[in-house]
């Protein structure tokens, strides 16, 4: 049986102060249990599996160029018998049982993935900070660092900033910090949310999250 989980957050300014207003995030979910953890884990493994490139490739003895001629005669040389230079025993020869190009693909139902994302947001609500907006900064890397220091954010910890749409100025001011990632609210990422120690969400992104993932 599904139920609506209402998360309430104070809206904060980049100065670290609260604006005095609260905002809610309503997510359809179930009671958190081991089953909920299993769904999150399944979605996470699916994403990791689909991210595998599978482009490692080696040549077998049939694919190595050359090797058609017998290196030396069968008898009388005192050396071991050899039939081809493309043998795996030879330098430059083929590889036995080596990796071949492979397409990695796994599937998870859309509703199951959305449920896992909602459960993950509920489980990480203590790590979520709702920001009014970023319009009060000068969109420089140093200003982003100062804003994070106000919230006692460790720059060695992964921080995820969720915005309604990508602002080119904000993107340029954050991309120099390797631990900070910028992501759009309608294209959330299970892996990034799970690994992020801090989640900064602009208030305008909450409505997009509700409309996109409560289906």
Image (tube, rainbow, N blue to C red):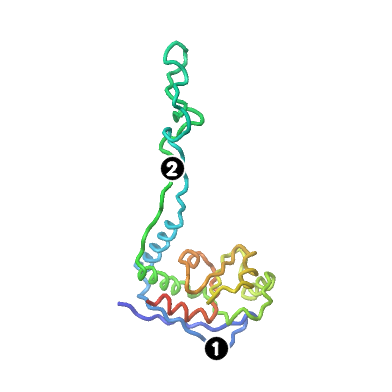
Mark nearer the N terminus (2 vs 1): 1
Q: Nearer the viewer, residue 123 or 11?
A: 11
Residue 27 image-quadrant placement: bottom left
How far separated are the C-alphas under marks 2 and 1? 57 Å
Above or below for 4 versus 174:
below
Q: Residue furthest left?
A: 1
Name the residue rendered at 47%, 29% in the picture: 66
Packing grade of label 2 (10 A; few <14, some 14-19, many >=20) is: some
Q: Nearer the viewer, residue 206 or 153?
A: 206
Q: Residue furthest bottom?
A: 20
Packing grade of label 1 (10 A; few <14, some 14-19, many >=20) is: few
Q: Judging from the image, what secondary structure is the residue with disc 2 in?
A: loop
Measured from the top left, where is residue 134 in percent x and y? 62, 78
- Residue beneath disc 2: 99
Name the residue rendered at 47%, 45% in the picture: 56
Name the residue rendered at 69%, 70% in the picture: 142
Measured from the top left, where is residue 1 in percent x and y? 30, 77
Measured from the top left, where is residue 43 in percent x and y? 40, 64
Q: Which mark is residue 21?
A: 1
Measured from the top left, where is residue 71 in percent x and y? 47, 21
Above or below for 46 versus 102:
below
Q: Judging from the image, what secondary structure is the residue with disc 1 in?
A: strand
Q: Quadrant of the C terminus?
A: bottom left
Q: Nearer the viewer, residue 149 or 165?
A: 165
Q: Count numbered badges in the picture.
A: 2
């Amino acid at each position: 049986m599904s139920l609506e989980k209402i998360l309430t957050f104070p809206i904060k300014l980049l100065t670290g102060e609260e604006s005095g207003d609260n905002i809610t995030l309503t997510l359809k979910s179930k009671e958190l249990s081991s089953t909920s953890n299993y769904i999150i884990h399944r979605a996470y493994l699916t994403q990791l599996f689909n991210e595998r490139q599978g482009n490692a490739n080696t040549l077998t003895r049939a694919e190595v160029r050359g090797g058609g001629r017998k290196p030396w005669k069968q008898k009388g040389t005192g050396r071991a018998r050899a039939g081809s230079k493309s043998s795996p025993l030879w330098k430059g020869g083929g590889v036995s049982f080596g990796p071949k190009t492979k397409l990695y693909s796994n599937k998870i139902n859309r509703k199951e993935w959305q449920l896992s994302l909602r459960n993950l947001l509920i489980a990480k609500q203590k790590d979520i900070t709702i920001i009014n907006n970023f319009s009060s900064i000068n969109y420089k890397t140093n200003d982003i660092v100062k804003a994070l220091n106000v919230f006692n954010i460790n720059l060695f910890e992964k921080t995820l900033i969720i915005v309604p749409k990508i602002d080119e100025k904000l993107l340029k001011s954050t991309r120099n910090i390797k631990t900070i990632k910028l992501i759009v609210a309608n294209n959330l990422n299970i892996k990034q949310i799970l690994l992020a120690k801090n989640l900064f969400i602009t208030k305008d992104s909450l409505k997009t999250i509700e409309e996109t993932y409560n289906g």
